[in-house]
Image: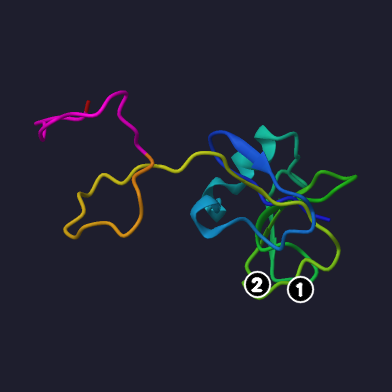
């Protein structure tokens, strides 16, 4: 199977996963570097890109061989048990939200404040 890959720090998922969660996806542009960072190798100096049903979606490594692949087939089923590698950390947005969030923040303060502050605590 193939292992989808990440830029910065990486995380492997069990090969029963079809792909990384969308917020942990590695782009095609980052795939080669991410694959190399987890011990993969380029085939003839190139990222192998294509559309396959039996490969995990996105960036991956071929087990046993370690070749770095990028699968563009978003409906792929990973029937050959490819092992996803995903981004370990979520990159924060640089654009402020205009609406209240429906989800709790992943940022936690060390202690509660009694009133709003001008900057994060």
x, y (%) of residue 108?
Answer: 34, 33
Q: What's the distance in space between the residues labelled 1 and 2, CA to CA?
A: 7 Å
Q: Which mark is residue 73?
A: 2
**Quadrant of the rendered structure where residue 18 is?**
bottom right
Q: In the image, is 39 to the left or to the right of 73? A: right
What are the residue bounds of the magenta stretch?
107-120
The residue at 21%/54% (across/down) is 97
Quadrant location, the N terminus: bottom right
The residue at 30%/29% (across/down) is 109
| Residue 39, magenta (yes or no) | no
| Residue 114, magenta (yes or no) | yes
Q: Earlier in the sequence, mark 1 or mark 2?
A: 1
x, y (%) of residue 65?
Answer: 87, 45
Q: In the image, is 84 to the left or to the right of 62? A: left
Q: In the image, is 46 to the left or to the right of 30? A: right
Q: Which mark is residue 110?
A: none
SS for dot 2: loop
x, y (%) of residue 90?
Answer: 45, 43
Query: Which residue lies under the disc numbered 1?
Result: 53
User: Which of the two residues, 105 or 79, is positioned nearer the viewer here?
Assistant: 105
x, y (%) of residue 94?
Answer: 26, 44
SS for dot 1: loop
**How many numbered circles are shown?**
2
User: Which of the two residues, 49 or 53, is positioned nearer the viewer here?
Assistant: 53
């Amino acid at each position: 199977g193939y292992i989808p890959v990440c830029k910065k720090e990486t995380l492997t998922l069990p090969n029963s996963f079809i792909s990384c969660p969308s917020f942990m996806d590695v782009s095609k542009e980052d795939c080669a570097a991410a694959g190399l960072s987890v011990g993969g190798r380029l085939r003839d100096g190139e990222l192998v890109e294509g559309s396959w049903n039996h490969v995990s979606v996105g960036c991956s490594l071929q087990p046993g061989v370690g070749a770095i692949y990028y699968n563009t087939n978003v409906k792929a089923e990973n029937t050959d048990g490819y092992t996803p590698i995903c981004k370990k950390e979520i990159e924060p947005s640089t654009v402020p939200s205009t609406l209240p969030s429906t989800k709790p923040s992943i940022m936690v303060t060390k202690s509660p404040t009694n009133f709003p502050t001008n900057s994060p605590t």
